[in-house]
Amino acid sequence: MAEAQRESDHEVAAWDEEETLAPMRQRLWVLYRGYWLKHQTAESVRLLEAQFEPRPDDLFLVTYPKSGTTWLKALAFAVANRQRHAAGSDGHPLLTNHPQDLVPFLELPDRRVHPVAGLDALASPRLLCTHMPVALLPPRVSALGCQVVYLCREPKDVLVSYWHFASKVHPDFTLDKAFQLFCQGVSSYGPIWEHYLGYWRQSLMEPHKILFLKYDDMMADPVSHVKTLAKFLRVPFSDDEVRRGVVEALVDLCSFDKLKSLQVNSSGVSDRIAGVPIENSSYFRAGKVGDWATHLTPEMAKKLDDIVEEKMRGSGLKF
Ligand code: A3P
């Protein structure tokens, strides 16, 4: 009897969960070749596949959403353009432009913002950004040997960051719902583990083409990571630059506290996601490693850890 009761409780709970989660899943995403994409993003990915012409010297910054894209954009832009714009100079573009706007995204739900023609008009070498999983990158990107910098982050921190961001646009996207969906692999560009493993395996096969970075490691030692990034982007720091403290100046300019404090990043609203105006400050929330602990219960943390560990088993990738 008790057993039967437990079983039916379980069924009701599962039914309740599906009743709440399924409509939200359908409203927000479509499963496109194994990945959960916003409907308009899937359309954009299709367009890019047909129309985007990569060039051999293109540099791609690829991230899982909420893994530190804004930071990577700022760092890569500052590294690549440091001869024209010294990190300490008054007129540095990062002082007056949101980092999101300095490196264009490939796939945007609204193609009017960065139409393919706009990408074609950019001078080489182009610095471009995308959240696309490796399986959805236009095939010629790999065939041409384009370089890719991939940045990922501890999944529990991604979930919390993602929930904060998405709930601004969808107020009914509660942490509980975000968590349940995330554990099923359902979040923008998810499953997160497929995204990570795709680039991880590719980086093991082609380390000269894919630089695999972790947000948490970069936070622990930004200077050495920025040196690695510069080398990978084929603009290594000279001994003289290192002596003059150019690397540290650049790390300071792109630090969370510095960028968050700038007027361009702390005020105003921009529409970067197709008709969804969002505060510029939303891209600079806590900027911490381990902030998940203030939001997730130990049970939630264990459940997600166990799922991620199981998915990563045997790959050599750990968080
Ligand atoms: P939190 O929400 O945990 O604070 P993305 O740029 O991919 O959307 O990721 C956003 C996350 O990166 C946010 O995490 C944000 O605070 C953090 N972030 C933004 N700029 C940063 C910087 N300069 N250094 C470190 N973290 C940064």
Image (cartoon, grey):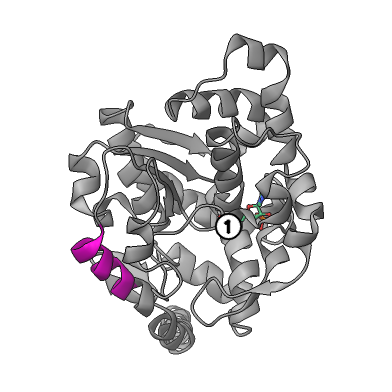
Q: Position of residue 88 (x, y in %)?
A: 76, 34
Up the image or down, 306 lies above or below 166; here it is above
Q: Circle 1: is it few (<14), some (14-19), or many (20+) Cα within 10 Å?
A: some
Q: Residue at x 48, y 25 (%)?
A: 235
Which quadrant: the N terminus?
Answer: bottom left
Residue 234 in magenta stretch: no
Specify the amino acid type for callout 1.
Gln
Magenta stretch bounds: 42-52
Q: Is the residue marked 1 within 8 Å of ligand 1, measured from its CB?
A: yes
Q: Residue at x 42, y 80 (%)?
A: 25
Q: Is residue 156 visible?
A: no
Q: Nearer the viewer, residue 265 or 198?
A: 265
Q: Position of residue 127 (x, y in %)?
A: 44, 45
| Magenta stretch, main secondary structure class | helix
Residue 145, image quadrant = top left
- Left or right: residue 269 compared with residue 4: right
Residue tagged 1:
100
- Left or right: residue 295 compared with residue 263: left
Up the image or down, 221 lies above or below 148; here it is above
Q: Residue at x 47, y 50 (%)?
A: 306
Secondary structure found at label 1: helix
